[in-house]
Amino acid sequence: MSALYVVFEVDGRLAAFDAADVQSVIEIEDIYPVPQSPAWVAGLTAMRSQSLTVIDCRLALELPAAETPGERAPVVKVDGHQYAIMVDAVDDVLEARSDVLPVPGGFGAGWKRIGKGMIETERGPVLLVDIDALIAGPCAKAA
């Protein structure tokens, strides 16, 4: 049986997290800015009385901010911290129809930094996202 992936869209491109890494998908209502945080950290929001750091996927990829942010966000946990990942749209949970393949060229620097492979799905090719690299943001490329 193939693995399942939570597929989302950012800047017209389909990308995915391994479904096992996604705790839930929430609707983001209020985001409270955090002074002096990096640009891709949109702020904090709440889920079931717990604080989540909101990561703006577009800004983490060094893309222009969305005119209208998506309303739903996958929630992931990294090193004991929970993050809501703002994407343009959450698409579906899909099964891979192929093994993980290398990422071809032409995606751009931000996508190349966070891409860990490609899979085929019923919706076509999907880029698998390295959650740690996404949360680290553009600064990670300098490290």
Image (tube, grey):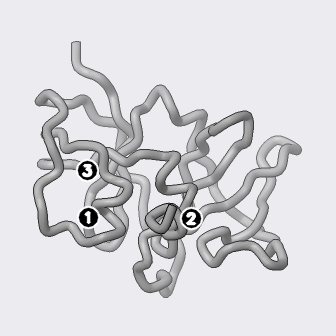
Q: Mark 2 packing: few (<14 Cα in 10 Å), some, or many (20+)?
A: some
Q: Earlier in the sequence, mark 2 or mark 1?
A: 1
**Residue 122 image point, x, y percent:** 14, 40
Whether pointer 3 and pointer 1 mark residues with C-beta atoms closer than 8 Å, the reply is yes
Of tags 2 and 1, the one toward the viewer is 1
**Residue 82 image point, x, y percent:** 70, 43
**Residue 53 image point, x, y percent:** 72, 56
Q: Amino acid at mark 1?
A: Arg
Of tags 3 and 1, the one toward the viewer is 3
- In space, the residues marked 3 and 1 are separated at their CA atoms by 8 Å
- Determine the secondary structure under disc 2: loop
Q: Mark 1 packing: few (<14 Cα in 10 Å), some, or many (20+)?
A: few
Q: Amino acid at mark 3?
A: Leu
Q: Within the image, what quadrant is residue 38 found in?
A: bottom right
* Vertical order, 30 against 27 (above or below): below
Give the residue number, with chain letter if any, for mark 3: 127
Of tags 2 and 3, the one toward the viewer is 3
**Residue 121 image point, x, y percent:** 16, 39
Q: Within the image, what quadrant is residue 9 found in?
A: bottom left
- In space, the residues marked 2 and 1 are separated at their CA atoms by 17 Å
- In space, the residues marked 2 and 3 are separated at their CA atoms by 21 Å
Quarter holding the N terminus? top left
Q: Is residue 51 left or right of residue 59?
A: right
Give the residue number, with chain letter if any, for mark 2: 71
Which residue is pictured at 61% across the width and 62% down the height? 55
Give the residue number, with chain letter if any, for mark 1: 13
